[in-house]
Image: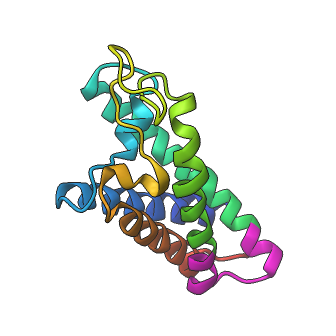
Amino acid sequence: MNWGSLALWGFIATVALTSLEAGSQGFGISRMSIPYILGSMATASRDRAKAIGLGVHLVNGWLFALLYGLIFQSIGMATWYYGAIVAFFHAMFVLTAGMWILPAIHPRMASEQAGPTARRQLEPPGFLALNYGYQTPISVIAAHLVYGALLGSFYTMR
């Protein structure tokens, strides 16, 4: 495992993914902000939640880069298309299992079964995060494909 390459390209790929997701929110393609959702798990302050969530999201991206690196090492090569294939499955896991379990672990998010309360005011993402806009799954998949393609393209195994 090439730790330096993994750290560098994992960070760059995570910044690209986060920027694409923020851009999709800024352009009205999706209402979802993963950094805000992650940060609001730790604090009720909206501004502080964005900063904390961005840090958590960057660390998560590095951790997932480690998983991608292990996959590349196990198949013996890193290419943009292997990265994109892994990223597609990663995105599908996020959109299905991740979004499904999120209301159960998020202290400020309502669930599909129990609506908002004074404490649980965030809207649940719903299946494929469709509650945040019908184009949300497309933007999440696209951002993850870029993440995987960048890692696969530039990660050097030696």
Q: Is residue 43 above or below residue 146?
A: above
Tell me residue 113's x, y (percent): 49, 32
Q: Is residue 150 magenta?
A: no
Q: Is residue 11 above or below residue 58?
A: below
Q: Quadrant of the N terminus?
A: bottom right
Q: Which residues are magenta?
A: 71-85
The answer to whether residue 156 of the structure is visible from this angle is yes
Q: Residue furthest front?
A: 113
Q: How is the image coloured?
A: rainbow
Q: Which of the 4 image quarters holds residue 38?
A: top left
Residue under the image location 78 percent in, 73 percent down: 73
Q: Is residue 127 above or below residue 110?
A: below
Residue under the image location 61 percent in, 78 percent down: 85
Residue under the image location 63 percent in, 72 percent down: 86
Q: Is residue 143 above or below residue 156?
A: above
Q: Residue furthest top?
A: 118
Tell me residue 68's x, y (percent): 67, 66
Q: Is residue 28 left or right of residue 73?
A: left
Residue under the image location 54 percent in, 63 percent down: 91
Q: Is residue 76 magenta?
A: yes
**Badge count:** 0
Tell me residue 76's x, y (percent): 79, 82
Q: Is residue 29 left or right of residue 21?
A: left
